Amino acid sequence: MTGPGVAGQETGAYGAIPRKEDARFVRGQGTFVDDISLPGMLHGAILRSPLAHARIISVDASAALAHPKVEAVLTGADLAGRGLAWMPTLSADVQAVLATDKVRFQGQEVAFVVAQDRYAARDALELIAVEYEPLPPVIDARTALAEDAPLVRDDLAGRADNRVFDWNAGDKTATDAVFATAEVTVGCDMVYPRSHPAPLETCGIVAASDAVTGRLTVWSTSQAPHAHRTLYSVITGLPEHKIRIVSPDLGGGFGSKVPVYPGYLCAIVASMVTGRPVKWVEDRSENLMSTAFARDYHMHGEIAATADGRILGVRARVLADHGAFNATAQPTKYPAGFFHIFTGSYDLQAAFCEVTGVYTNKAPGGVAYSCSFRVTEAVYLVERLVDLLARELEMDPAQLRMRNLLRPEQFPYTCPTGWQYDSGDYPRALALAMDLAGYQELRREQAERRGRGEYMGIGISFFTEGVGAGPRAHMDILGLGMADGADLRVHPTGKVVLAVSVQTQGQGHETTFAQLVAHELGLTPDDVEVVHGDTDRTPFGLGTYGSRSTPVSGAAAVLAARKVRDRARLVAAAMLELSPDDLDWLDGKWRVRGDPDRGAGIAEIAMAAHSSLELPDGVEGHLDASAVYNPPNLTFPFGAYICVTDVDPGTGEVTVRRFIAVDDCGVRINPMIVEGQVHRGLADGIGMALMQAIAFDENGNCLGGSFMDYLLPTALECPSPELGATVTPSPHHPVGAKGIGESATVGSPPAVVNSVVDALAPFGVRHADMPLTPANVWRAIQGRPVRPDLAVS
Amino acid sequence: MKVTLTVNGTEYARDVEPRLLLIHLLRDELGLTGSHWGCDTSNCGACVVWLDDTPVKSCTVLAVMADGRRVLTVEGLANGASLDPVQQGFAQCHGLQCGFCTPGMMLTARWLLNNNPHPSPYQVREAISGQVCRCTGYENIVKAVLWAAEYEAAEHGAAEHGAGG
């Protein structure tokens, strides 16, 4: 065969091989930001607001400055003098770096101390005197638009209320018509509570400003180092070519390391002020209380269907709590992210959603935590609605889904809100999941147990994601099109260095990307070194989030490799004194057509390209190539999940007994890594559905500010997952791959909630909001469900 | 205060503040950055090291409490170039992703296998239940520890066979 890039048919570099990065990690030799120590380095600490909403009367740092180990203190006034008290957010709002006028959430940054060691910096925070005038806070998003609601953002000229945006998608008229005539409609209020991705490594930075060269070097926890470089240049006025961002090993990110945080800028300014490197690493409470939260969607959803279970339409009204600053990191044109993919995996006639974003006195953020730009909320909404419909129709929820899933022949499929799903075979995935689960047997067991007064639940979710942002015509962040790059250098001996613009946080890019290139060039993954996370050494690109690394930068790596291969063909033809047309790429070499034993591989060709060989036209002397990939569409991974739970009606405790997950992410480069991504997301779903929520009291005090209160699943709560796979290649990705990084985080929460609600059906429970803690489940059983996102109701 | 301790077989003497945490002594004073700090509240276990023969969360141990005692960190797990079977298991079974919790997980796993060479999957889960991993969902960590247990059982069997034969 001569056609390039058909997975599994060339050199076999794909497959479940161990990761290249593990050699350093198992020896404790990773380099995380807090591991970096520079000569003369100082340590920063942030003084934060104890109040959710208050006017700042005065800030007196004189006692802190008198501390013998303190080298500098920055206040909002100091930054204002440099024009840096405010910075742009990724959603074209502004955010205070250090507060000047008001504090707008508990934990907001007020002052920055720089001292000789990290303990002294913390000590000195106690010496800063801040006088506040407390203001009434806006805590419950439902009251944010009330006429008498306090104004959160009085800094914005002409703003009279707390509305961030009104946005809608779909056809309202057509949808209303479907609902007006439908035989059955079901609706439900549901809250997707505020959560936090809580990577085990918190955010941090080491900033080193060199006054002589004018260079700024930053080591920071960044999923998007190139975007950060551009942002720092825009914010500080430093020329972009004088800024170098190094994102070393990251201890997880999950979206929370996409934004630029005030602490980063404080450390940069502090380095400029002191002339010394400055490190700042947030503690866990700072992480949970101030860096990017996720979700916080208050949804009313409705579904319309025929009496025999044909789904006709969905509609939704959403109140989106964006906190004090609109700092979501998502494509500019989509203020509610990709929420309008809420038609899910179903063949329906009409859909309409409207989303209102509001400011409240809470931390900013919004799309962190592996949500595929709000696909998480969309999938939760539609999958809960389908289960509610099944209950209403007294149909089996699996049967109802199977009846309404899109059929393979409908792809590419344009959904009622405009997304064009690239490929899929949904019934096959659901059938496989049901088979793996032994679905019918589970239902029989459930009936038996109910007879004995035992409460077992079986929950299904079927999800479709759109990932790999994205098409430049529609998708940018702050005007930067969402493309990614790859540079490939081929050394004379045929060893290869691939530099990519995306940045792993544990996803194994050094392995997967090496496999991608090796596969194209007839090499082994060990022949390919992957460079990433250093803006001086890698091409521009928007970074890793929204499951975009393999769909975008992976595609760029493949295209660069194919350019290398094409150039190698010219050189091989010169070597063999043949026409390039006489050569076929076969089994990892350019081979002579009709005489396949004659040929040359990349290593021989690379050496020849550097030798005295008379080079053909189009070859300048080496095989290096670059590519930038502008995706023509998103990729649309999908999956079918089944969660089996047991609920103790006396305590409300939920045990996840089994989790069956069938994922289709197209062609799998390294199935071991893919499955690892799924494992993670299933744990996320269990955590979000059963225990994780960042709640607030009526004064805006954060009730989830430590791991004592913000509960994460441990090995005892997570079952051993049972995975399955189907492979439906993406028709537009160069190797047919789709993103996988967020699939399970997106798909699993509704499976867990559907399972618990199914278990509680004998009690008449129709819906209960996450997190389904024992207390919340018990209250639902008693017929008194609570809103879990607020301490007040 | 003066503190003298043995870390991974090497004796160190330092003059430290009484409040200095063991994790910061290891990382900032001794340059052993393989142990990580993750939460402040003893919940996550990224900082787990051995104090004498027991895993502890070094973010809630004062450095001076380690005076006269032995500490084992991830840097001391391997025997020269030869990785501990637990380290091999983590790499073989994809028991890590970002690598941040891994040192603490491996030190607990080593302790478990020393005390229970043939743990059940549940016993592995119980042993690491005071520690958090945000990447793996724990499944492959469990597999990694069981891999190490099997590897060591096979080695042990081979050694006994060798001695007897």
Image (tube, coloured by chain):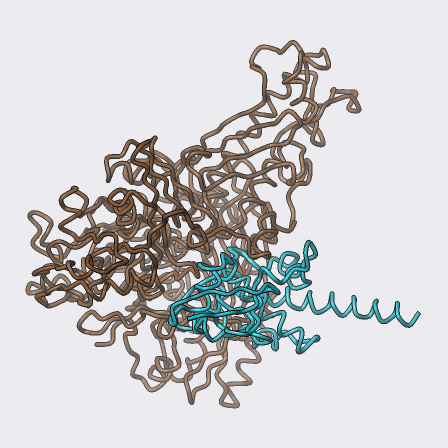
Chain colours: A brown, B cyan
Say left or right for A480 vs A564: left
Q: Nearer the viewer, residue A413 or A748?
A: A748
Give the vertical position of A12 relative to A663 (above or below): above
Residue A10, located in which quarter of the rendered image? top right
Q: Nearer the viewer, residue A469 or A632?
A: A469
Give the vertical position of B73 relative to A766 (above or below): above
Does residue A430 appear in this view? Answer: yes
Give the vertical position of A43 relative to A707 (above or below): above
Say left or right for B127 vs A196: right
Give the vertical position of A59 relative to A582 (above or below): below
Q: Residue A411, position in %: x, y?
A: 48, 44
Residue extending farthest to the right is B165
Q: Residue A665, position in %: x, y?
A: 53, 49
Q: Residue at x 15, y 63 (%)?
A: A144
Quarter of the figure that contains the N terminus of chain A? top right
Residue A474, located in which quarter of the rendered image? top left
Q: Residue A483, position in %: x, y?
A: 40, 35
Quarter of the figure that contains the C terminus of chain A? bottom left
Q: Residue A766, position in %: x, y?
A: 36, 76
Residue A418, located in which quarter of the rendered image? top left
Q: Residue at x 25, y 47 (%)?
A: A89
* Total residue callouts: 0
Q: Nearer the viewer, residue A511 or B77?
A: B77
Does residue A166 appear in this view? Answer: no
Say left or right for B45 vs A518: left
Q: Nearer the viewer, residue B59 or A498?
A: B59
